[in-house]
Image (cartoon, helix red, strand yellow):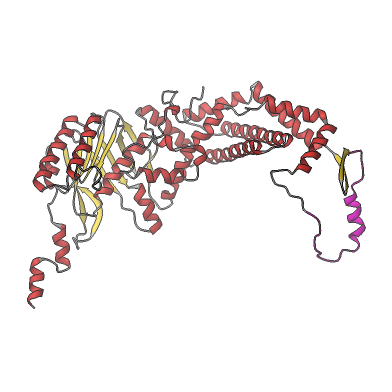
Amino acid sequence: MVLNSILGHNGRDRTDQTSDQAPGCFADLALDQIVEAIVGGRDEYNLRPFFYTPLNDPDAVRYRHQVMQDLDGQPLFQSVKTFAVAMRTVRSHLSQADKLHYRYQKMRWQLSAGRTYCDAVTAFAQDLLQTDLRSEGFRGLRDYLASYIRSAAFSALLAETEALEADLAALRYCLLIKPNSIQVKKYEGEEDYSLIVERAFERFKQGAVKDYRVKFQTGATMNHIEAQILEYVAQLHPDTFVALDEFCTRHAGFMDATIATFDREIQFYVAYLEYMERFRRLGLAFCYPEVSSQDKDIRGADCFDAALATRLMVEQAQVVCNDFYLNGGERILVVTGPNQGGKTTFARMFGQMHFLASLGLPVPGRQARLFLFDHLLTHFEAEEDIANLQGKLHDDLVRMHAIFDQATPRSIVILNEIFNSTTIDDAIFLSKEILGRIVDLDCLCVCVTFIDELASLNEKTVSMVSTVAHDDPSVRTFKIVRRPADGLSYAITVAEKHGLTYRRLKERLAQ
């Protein structure tokens, strides 16, 4: 078995074709906040393009699910993290070597990087051999590493790093330090005077005493005196330092490209698993969704907006979960109800779940079956831009035109409070026209609206309503349920509660 990519399925989903630009739906769905929370602190891996590039093949999604399941809750996760730490050390040593000026010091850092690399690869390969692996990705990696560590190139790298480190550790030399000079010579069995001095003064030691010994600096850089001493040591032991020079030339690019690629790509999974764990600790579920690129029957149970949940966790507030489903010919969820009742959050959650599922990742919810789209298109209310001199309604229509230029029967469209800037009659007319186009396309859609008439437009539309507390209609529950739009005026309910209706005000003023 050959490893193509821990992210790709048999090479068909090429990870070198990722996008550096976030999709247009990211800001509307708060996916930009989610991705930043996931990749924060991992800039060295440049993970964002992986989160910008959805998959369109259900088999590719299942490939990533299997890799994630091998990692999720398994000892393998710790092995991967240990390997990542070692590889970070390798890169750090190589980077340090590039910054240094003295050649033998540069070579020693490269040798140290090579030895750390060999140890990390060998240990990780052994861990994989001892782990029950289910995923095609990790089984391919296990086979690749087993073959790689038996290769002539790796065997030579390991043998040479071990031999050189042993030779360097065995070097002995003497320094004769005078006021204006330092003499470097071979060690010829001279006695260690420090031990003699310590024994001489041992008899005078009484209890804890101050340590007057000078501590040498052990930083990464050397000064010119240390560098000159090292040059003389190299002259005293030419065979060892010639071998070091030849090693650095021969193994300048010792890191295997496939292993280096894995080291970066596996962080896609590691980062997301650590992100999920924040929610799991609070009892919020993530699940591996069923996905289909053909069947539009979808559902989700106990789902939540991950971006909002992150903020609520900081505030120690409750996260409200919601359900949804579409069966048969149903295609459009029309969400109505009071302002600030969770409608926009529901729409964002719906989009987030589908996008995360398209990346081959678990989604926030207890259970889910989702559709694998070709385009995820959004239209959320935006502030009027006075610079374009077009007006809010014109801008809404232009944006909707752009959506229909891209939308296909395999697309998902999410509309949030469109046409709020016009009259109610015009809003109803335009909204019906828009939903009619979406019905004709047969694509999936969530439409958040204040127009109750849209909830019963035709057999493809399903009404969902943001609910309020039974004993106090002014209190939002943030639960979105599947039921007919009720047409209640929640503003009147709130005004009645606080004595601000026309009738109550008139009575109070008459007193």
Residue 283: % across, % down: 39, 51
Point out the image quarter for the C terminus: bottom left
Locate residue 329: give its quadrant: top left
**Which residue occupies 74% across, 29% down?**
244
Residue 219 visible? The answer is yes
Number of marks present in the image shown = 0
* 317 inside magenta stretch: no
Left or right of 510? Residue 375 is: right
In front here: 64 or 342?
342
**From the viewer's perspective, is residue 415 above or below residue 147?**
below
Q: Residue at image x 61%, y 39%?
A: 92
Displayed quadrant of residue 259: top right
Q: Could you tell me residue 81's position as x and y percent?
A: 55, 40
- Give percent across and percent down for residue 127: 59, 34
The residue shown at (41%, 53%) is: 282
Taking the view exactly as shown, the residue that stands out farthest to the bottom is: 511
Residue 204 belongs to the span the image colors magenta: yes
Looking at the rendering, the stretch of residues picked out in magenta corresponds to 187-214
Left or right: residue 418 compared with residue 169? left
Residue 243 against residue 361 in the figure, above or below: above
- Position of 37 compared to 153: left or right? left
Residue 159 in view of the camera: no
* Above/below status of 498 relative to 480: below
172 and 442: which one is in front? 172
Q: Is residue 304 left or right of residue 201?
A: left
Residue 437: percent from left, percent from top? 16, 33
Q: Residue at x 90, y 49 (%)?
A: 193
Our reading of the magenta stretch's main secondary structure is loop
